[in-house]
Image: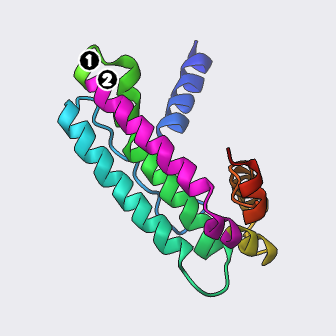
């Protein structure tokens, strides 16, 4: 019985003890999510967050100089992950809210988010920036290289890598 108690206590201590940091950079706090939004709050916060993301993506696309993982791939990933985090409730409530007005506002937010992603991933300027960052082989590790590859594939699937003549030939 004593052995079981000791093992249990050690397990509790291990699970509740803070993990030893392997990096000198502080861990980011998770984005707080408010699940009790009203329809007008969903609309205003969605539009505001999309505006921030559009501005950041445009600034990133228009940045000059050598493209690297740190100044191209990572900022693009951060723009999108921040937007997903900040719009989690605004987009999810279309599926679970009992209030029709909230569901409609949430669905509108999700539609706007989807349009933003379609525009972003079909942007040839951002695509060329990602390709340039990949050719510089500046990703810090295998995960960074894989992220770069996946982003480039996403942009290619959206048509960002197609030549203008090719785009005209497939348009209706």
Pick the residue in front: 120 or 67: 120
The numbered disc on residue 103 is: 2
Q: Residues within 10 Å of mark 1 (few under 14, many from 20)?
A: few
In which quadrant of the rendered view does residue 133 lie? Answer: bottom right
Residue 23 position, x and y percent, is 58, 65
Local SS, label 1: helix
* Scheme by which the image is coloured: rainbow
Q: How many marks?
A: 2
Quarter of the picture containing the N terminus is top right
Question: Mark 1 and mark 2 in contact (Cβ < 8 Å)?
Answer: yes
Residue 45 position, x and y percent, is 27, 46
Q: Residue drawn at (75%, 61%), measured in percent from left and top?
A: 161
In which quadrant of the rendered view does residue 32 lie? Answer: top left
Q: Which residues are magenta?
A: 102-129
For the stretch drawn in magenta, the main secondary structure is: helix
Local SS, label 2: helix
- 53 to the left or right of 81: left
Q: Residue drawn at (31%, 18%), measured in percent from left and top?
A: 97
Question: In this rendering, does residue 17 appear at all?
Answer: no
Q: Residue drawn at (59%, 75%), measured in percent from left and top?
A: 71
The numbered disc on residue 100 is: 1
Pick the residue in front: 104 or 88: 104
Quarter of the picture containing the C terminus is top right
């Amino acid at each position: 019985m004593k052995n079981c108690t000791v093992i249990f206590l050690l397990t509790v201590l291990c699970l509740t003890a803070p993990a030893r940091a392997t990096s000198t950079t502080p861990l980011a706090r998770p984005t707080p999510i408010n699940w009790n939004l009203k329809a007008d709050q969903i609309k205003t916060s969605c539009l505001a967050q999309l505006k921030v993301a559009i501005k950041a993506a445009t600034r990133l696309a228009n940045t000059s100089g050598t493209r690297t993982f740190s100044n191209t791939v990572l900022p693009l990933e951060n723009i999108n992950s921040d937007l997903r985090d900040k719009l989690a409730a605004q987009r999810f409530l279309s599926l679970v809210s009992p209030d029709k007005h909230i569901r409609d506002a949430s669905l509108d937010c999700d539609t706007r988010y989807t349009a933003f992603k379609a525009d972003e991933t079909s942007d040839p300027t951002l695509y060329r920036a990602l390709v340039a960052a990949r050719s510089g082989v500046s990703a810090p590790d295998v995960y960074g290289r894989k992220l770069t590859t996946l982003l480039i594939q996403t942009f290619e699937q959206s048509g960002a890598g197609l030549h203008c003549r090719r785009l005209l030939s497939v348009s209706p």
